[in-house]
Amino acid sequence: MTLWLWILGACALAYLTKLSGYLVPQRILESPALVRISACMTVGLLASLVMMNAVGDGQRLAFDSRLLALGAAIVALRMRAPFLVVVVAGALAAALGRLAGLP
């Protein structure tokens, strides 16, 4: 098979998977267990994406100014700062880290 056939097959499979979601009965989608599991999966996925963006650099770990930005954002969030303040605090921490010589 050529590469394009694999790509088209993957597209069809993704479309059919999404389409099959409409066939699930509403009572199953609204069950408390499923709602709780999907909420936990969302939080776990977001946490893993944040950590991979903060310390990941290809196939290795990189401890640089992004980690300072994450720490500053966490502190600002714990102080219940508005979202814009959290973003600015993270950006300032990253800028100061790079100014200090961190990669």
Image: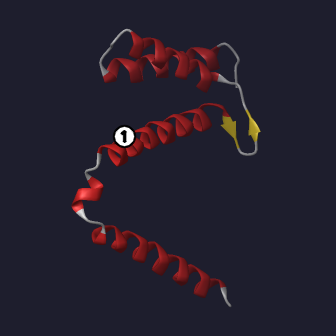
Q: Are there few (<14), some (14-19), or many (20+) residues within 10 Å of tag 1?
A: few
Q: Is residue 82 above or below residue 62?
A: above
Q: Residue furthest toward the bottom?
A: 1
Q: Is residue 72 left or right of residue 81?
A: right
Q: Residue at x 23, y 57 (%)?
A: 27
The residue nearer to you, when weighing 12 against 95, is: 12
**Total marks drawn?**
1
Indicate the secondary structure of the residue bearing disc 1: helix
Amino acid of disc 1: Arg
Residue 8 position, x and y percent, is: 52, 83
Instruction: Quickly name the residue at label 1.
Output: 36
Q: Quadrant of residue 82?
A: top left
Q: Is residue 55 left or right of residue 89?
A: right
Residue 62 position, x and y percent, is: 72, 31
Colour scheme of this structure image?
secondary structure
Q: Quadrant of residue 33?
A: top left
Q: Residue at x 46, y 12 (%)?
A: 75
The residue nearer to you, when weighing 10 against 82, is: 10
The residue nearer to you, when weighing 36 against 46, is: 36
Residue 102 position, x and y percent, is: 70, 20
Q: Quadrant location of the C terminus?
A: top right
Q: Quadrant of residue 69?
A: top right
Q: Is residue 29 left or right of residue 3?
A: left
Q: Is residue 93 above or below residue 8?
A: above
Q: Residue at x 44, y 16 (%)?
A: 89
Q: Residue at x 25, y 65 (%)?
A: 25
Residue 72 position, x and y percent, is: 50, 15
Q: Is residue 41 above or below residue 81?
A: below
